[in-house]
Image: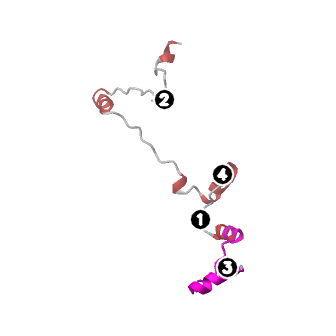
C-alpha cells in the first residue's frame, strides 16, 4: 500500500517510525477468513451449516429460563400440592376461558 504525499510529509514531520499496516477490505477479509473467530453474519441456512460443522458457541445458546413464581404460589404448591396456571402477562383471556366450549 503506497502512501500519499501528505501522509509521507506528516510521517516525516512527526518522526513516526510505525510499520505500515494494510487496512484494505482485502486484508480485512483475509483476516476474517483465517481467524478462529466465528462469522458475524450469515443466512439462516449458512448458520445451520456452520453450527453443524462447528457446534453452537456459548454466546449463541439461549439461556435456560426458570419460571419465577410468587411466594404465595410457592407456599400453595408446598402445602397443598396445588399448582395454579399463570396467565401470561400479555394475554387478555383467562386460562380457563376455553373450558366452556
Q: Residue 13, image x and y in percent? A: 59, 85
Q: Residues within 10 Å of mark 2 (few under 14, many from 20)?
A: few
- Alpha carbon separation for disc pair 4 and 3: 48 Å
What is the span of residues highlighted in magenta in the rendered image?
Answer: 2-29
Mark closest to the chain's N terminus, 4 or 1 = 1
User: Is residue 14 visible from the viewing direction of this image?
Assistant: yes
Q: Are marks 4 and 1 in contact (CB under 8 Å)?
A: no
Q: Residues within 10 Å of mark 3 (few under 14, many from 20)?
A: few
Considering only vertical position in the picture, is 68 above or below 62?
Answer: above
Residue ID for mark 4: 48
Q: Secondary structure at mark 3?
A: helix
Considering only vertical position in the picture, is 29 above or below 82?
Answer: below
Question: What residue is shown at x 59% (from left), y 57% (from top)?
Answer: 55
Mark closest to the chain's N terminus, 4 or 3 = 3
Residue ID for mark 1: 37
Question: What residue is shown at x 50% (from left), y 12% (from top)?
Answer: 100
Specify the farthest residue to the top. Answer: 100
Q: Residues within 10 Å of mark 4 (few under 14, many from 20)?
A: few
Q: Nearer the viewer, mark 3 or mark 2?
A: 3
- Alpha carbon separation for disc pair 3 and 2: 61 Å
- Alpha carbon separation for disc pair 1 and 2: 39 Å
Residue ID for mark 3: 6
Q: Looking at the rendering, which quadrant does residue 9 occupy?
A: bottom right
Residue ID for mark 2: 90
Q: Are marks 3 and 1 in contact (CB under 8 Å)?
A: no
Answer left or right for 18 relative to 76. Answer: right
Answer left or right for 27 relative to 74. Answer: right
For the N terminus, which image quadrant? Answer: bottom right
Q: Secondary structure at mark 2?
A: loop
Q: Looking at the rendering, which quadrant does residue 57 occupy?
A: bottom right
Amino acid at each position: 500500500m503506497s502512501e500519499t504525499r501528505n501522509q509521507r510529509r506528516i510521517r516525516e514531520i512527526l518522526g513516526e517510525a510505525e510499520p505500515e499496516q494494510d487496512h484494505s477490505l482485502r486484508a480485512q477479509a483475509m483476516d476474517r477468513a483465517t481467524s478462529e473467530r466465528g462469522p458475524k453474519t450469515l443466512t439462516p441456512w449458512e448458520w445451520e451449516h456452520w453450527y453443524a460443522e462447528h457446534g453452537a458457541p456459548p454466546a449463541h445458546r439461549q439461556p435456560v429460563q426458570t419460571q419465577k413464581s410468587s411466594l404465595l404460589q410457592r407456599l400453595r404448591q408446598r402445602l397443598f400440592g396445588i399448582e395454579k396456571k399463570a396467565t401470561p402477562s400479555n394475554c387478555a383471556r383467562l386460562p380457563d376461558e376455553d373450558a366452556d366450549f
